[in-house]
Image (cartoon, helix red, strand yellow):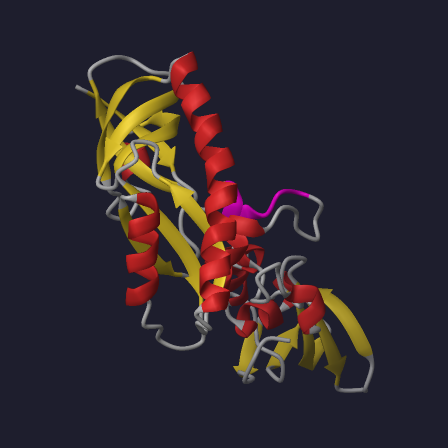
Amino acid sequence: MARYVVRCGLMRTLFVMNARSDFRRGDVVIARTNRGLERGEVLCEATDHVLGQMKDPPAGNIQRLASQEDENENQYLLEAQKREFETCKRLIREMGMPMSLVDVELIFGGEQIVVYYTSEDRVDFRDLVKKLSTEYQTRIEMRQIGARDEAKVLADYGDCGKPVCCNTHLGEMPPVSMRMAKLQKATLDPNKISGRCGRLKCCLRYENDTYEEIAAELPNVGSEIVTPQGRGKVLGVEILAQQLLIVTEDNRRVLIPASDCLTVLKRGSEHG
């Protein structure tokens, strides 16, 4: 039985699904997941190489290619979501609930409605769920999300001019630290290194492993080294260029290739 990676839902979850027929990248399919019947997009075949890059992906089964009738139904659901978003927003406002509504998702098969929201505190939404269940006669799932997930749902383009990574190719969003920005000599201005979510940009992680690998082979700032021109002290390190700014014994500042470092007499504390 063939297996494929299929992207489904508002949160663009990646599933590994069994299929009795062959499918191609880009095929729009109707699939059965743990949430019910969903519309999804086939991304690729679930080869061993692909599965090795995924961490505990949820499973599912592809039922069929989406028909024109399925597409009409999906269009109807998208219009219905707009109305139900406004209804849910009104109820939250009337009930004075300490939460901010992000979006509402109708599962294709009608098994449930998922309400995405953000909140600084825990929210008792039992009364809201009762009202929504009575209104729509289906199961309601309340899902609290963070700032990065909110951007994944709502954001469009990043500062680079391309669609935000979290809403295109990122299956999960690993943590990003200020240390990564410092190592890559990115500006530390929060307004320039923060994404649409207000958190550090995910792209700071993309090249971090390369920076760390190269940096591990270079002397740190403050290191005392020996070069073909004599002894010197490292004032700065250009990691990708693999160059060192040093001050020589006669107080000259010189930019040298890292390969000119013959030995490290005393290692400094950090990369600059």
Q: What is the quadrant of the N terminus in the image?
A: top left
Residue 177 spot, x, y in % from top left: 51, 70
Residue range (magenta):
162-168
User: In this view, which residue lies farthest toward the left?
Assistant: 1
In this rendering, does residue 160 appear at all? yes
Is 224 drawn above or below residue 125 in the view shown?
Answer: below
Is 201 drawn above or below residue 15 in the view shown?
Answer: below
Is 212 drawn above or below residue 230 in the view shown?
Answer: above
- Residue at point 34%, 53% (across, down): 132
Relative horizontal placement of residue 49, taking residue 89 as reference (left or right): left
Relative horizontal placement of residue 212, taking residue 46 as reference (left or right): right
Residue 69 spot, x, y in % from top left: 40, 15
Q: Quadrant of residue 31?
A: top left
In the depicted view, which residue is nearer to us: 184 or 26?
A: 26
Residue 196 spot, x, y in % from top left: 62, 59
Is residue 149 shown in magenta? no
Q: Quadrant of residue 121?
A: bottom left
Relative horizontal placement of residue 220, taking residue 16 as reference (left or right): right
In this rendering, does residue 174 appear at all? no
- Residue at point 55%, 78% (across, down): 264
Residue 8 spot, x, y in % from top left: 37, 36
